[in-house]
Amino acid sequence: MEQPRSDDVIHVPASVRFPGELVPPDGFDPARLETWPRVEGRLEWVDAATLREKARWYLTQEVPVVWIVLPGEREVIVVTSTGETCHAIGERLPVRQELPGLQPQVADFFRQISPS
């Protein structure tokens, strides 16, 4: 049975994958919201410096490129082993050899977020 939509729920596509350090709970099925873990309390916001630190960790794990999406600023930071670049609405992310054909518009990241 499909759950009613709520502003308190962030819906994600079924293609969502847990990071390697997180293990999905037994019985988890991304297509069935009732199997998703319940989170008590409020969302915690992480600052850009913490996200950059995590991005650097991913680079040490041989991930070639990390995208940091900043909803408040409506920007995407692209982090690689050679540095980082910041991209705003109206721009496309740079093409990467490791991600052939994937060069999204920055605006596409924020399509489902209400205007600030």
Image (cartoon, grey):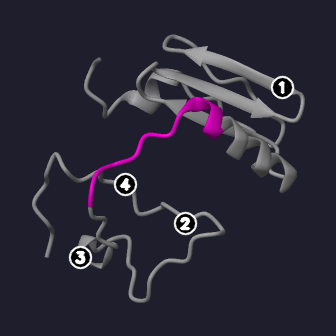
Q: Quadrant of residue 53?
A: top right
Spatial separation of the CA atoms under disc 3 and disc 2: 17 Å
Identify the residue at horizontal 69%, vertical 46% (top origin): 54
| Position of 5 relative to 23 (above/below) | above
**Around disc 1, counting alpha carbons within 10 Å, would you say few (fewer than 14), some (14 to 19), or many (20 or more)?**
few
Front tag of 3 and 1:
1
94 part of magenta stretch: no
In the image, the segment drawn in magenta is 41-51
Residue identified by numbered label 4: 12
Q: Of callouts 3 and 1, which one flags the residue occurring earlier in the amino acid sequence?
A: 3
- Residue type beneath disc 1: Gly
The quadrant in which the N terminus is found is bottom left
Spatial separation of the CA atoms under disc 4 and disc 2: 12 Å
Residue identified by numbered label 3: 34
48 part of magenta stretch: yes
Q: Of callouts 1 and 2, which one flags the residue occurring earlier in the amino acid sequence?
A: 2
